[in-house]
């Protein structure tokens, strides 16, 4: 029984050693995976840079839109003041015309 166990253990060692000698294909696959991971990391970095750039552009566009809205509000306020001035002037002219006609 011990003889059979010893022979089985020796056979197992031989099979294990034979399996270990065939690591070159696995090593090339590992190297290939490393290069793919490296490429993916650089792709991820460039995608992050593009996303950051897009976020900065969106922020700049939002700031420009806020400035444009502020200027539009100021222009609307100026136009309203101008219209009130025109209305007041027209009222004065109408009153003066009515006074001159009534005399």
Image (tube, rainbow, N blue to C red):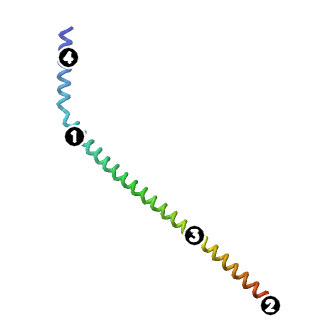
The residue labelled by disc 3 is: 74
Crowd class of label 4 (few under 14; some 14 to 19; many from 20; radius 10 Å) = few
Q: Nearer the viewer, mark 4 or mark 1?
A: 1
Q: Nearer the viewer, mark 3 or mark 1?
A: 3
The residue labelled by disc 4 is: 9
Q: Nearer the viewer, mark 4 or mark 2?
A: 2
Q: Residue at x 17, y 27 (%)?
A: 18
Q: Nearer the viewer, residue 8 or 58?
A: 58
The local secondary structure at tag 4 comes to helix
The local secondary structure at tag 3 comes to helix
Residue 90 position, x and y percent, is 71, 82
The residue labelled by disc 1 is: 28
The residue labelled by disc 2 is: 101
Does 101 appear above or below 79? below
21 relative to 102 in the view: left or right? left
Does 88 appear above or below 51? below
Does 96 appear above or below 56? below
Q: Residue at x 61, y 70 (%)?
A: 77
Name the N-terminal-most of marks 3 and 4: 4
Kindly check if marks 4 and 2 are in contact, taking CB atoms under 8 A apart as contact. Answer: no
Image quarter of the N terminus: top left
Name the N-terminal-most of marks 4 and 1: 4
The local secondary structure at tag 1 comes to helix
Residue 99 position, x and y percent, is 79, 87
């Amino acid at each position: 029984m011990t003889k059979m166990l010893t022979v089985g253990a020796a056979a197992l060692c031989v099979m294990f050693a034979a399996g270990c000698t065939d690591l070159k294909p696995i090593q090339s696959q590992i190297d290939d995976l490393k290069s793919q991971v490296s490429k993916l990391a650089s792709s991820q970095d460039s995608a992050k840079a593009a996303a950051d750039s897009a976020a900065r552009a969106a922020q700049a566009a939002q700031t420009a839109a806020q400035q444009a809205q502020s200027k539009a509000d100021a222009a609307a306020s100026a136009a309203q003041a101008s219209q009130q001035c025109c209305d007041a002037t027209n009222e004065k002219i109408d009153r003066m015309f009515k006074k001159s006609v009534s005399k």
